[in-house]
Amino acid sequence: MSTVPGPMRIPPLLTELNTDFWTGGLEGELRIQRCTHCATYHHPPTSVCRNCLRGGLTAQAVSGTATVMAFTINHHQWSPTATTEPYVIAIVELPEQDGLRITTNIVNCDVRDVHIDMPVRVVFEPLADVALPLFEPDR
């Protein structure tokens, strides 16, 4: 679980396509949609495979490790109830497939320690009926 103050969290709107992604963390799994025909992963979830243009996509648990590809440190309080502490917004790439990326927060470390190519692993923050996938340094 995240122990570093972060941004105010708003629960996502669950849909038929994204429910597995948002609820997988309740069972300790990062679930990413994958095509049953060509095995291509997709994030964000979609109703048709962007590779083979067929249906038949299912959620599959992945390793939960990733690499920081890009990041920014937010220093501005965007809501009266949001944290005043700086926090990291990052794009991480999962090793399961080139280009398989998630936008997330990097937590449980000093924001000044985050860097490109940093190895990270998923941690989940429960929120309402979901678990938000955040990432922390993989030491």
Image (spheres, rainbow, N blue to C red):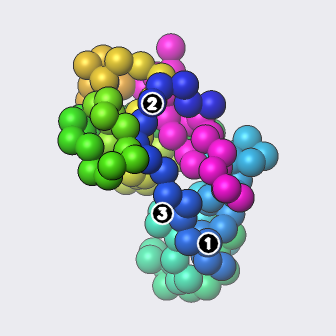
What residue is rendered at 26% in x and 43% in y?
77
**Residue labelled with disc 1:** 14
Q: Kindly identify which numbered label has been placed on residue 40.
A: none
Q: Residue 1, how many percent across, how many down? A: 62, 31
Q: Position of residue 137 (x, y in %)?
A: 46, 22
Secondary element under disc 3, as helix, strand or loop, is loop
- Between 101 and 35, the one nearer to me in the picture: 101
How many angstroms separate mark 3 from mark 1 (CA)?
15 Å
The range drawn in magenta is 119-139
Residue 70: x and y in percent read: 26, 40
Cα distance in 3D space between marks 1 and 2: 25 Å
Query: Which numbered disc, 1 or 2, marks the residue that appears first in the sequence?
Result: 2
The extreme front residue here reads 80
Assign the magenta stretch its main secondary structure: strand
Please, which residue is most extreme toward the top here? Answer: 139
- Residue 52 can be seen in this image: yes
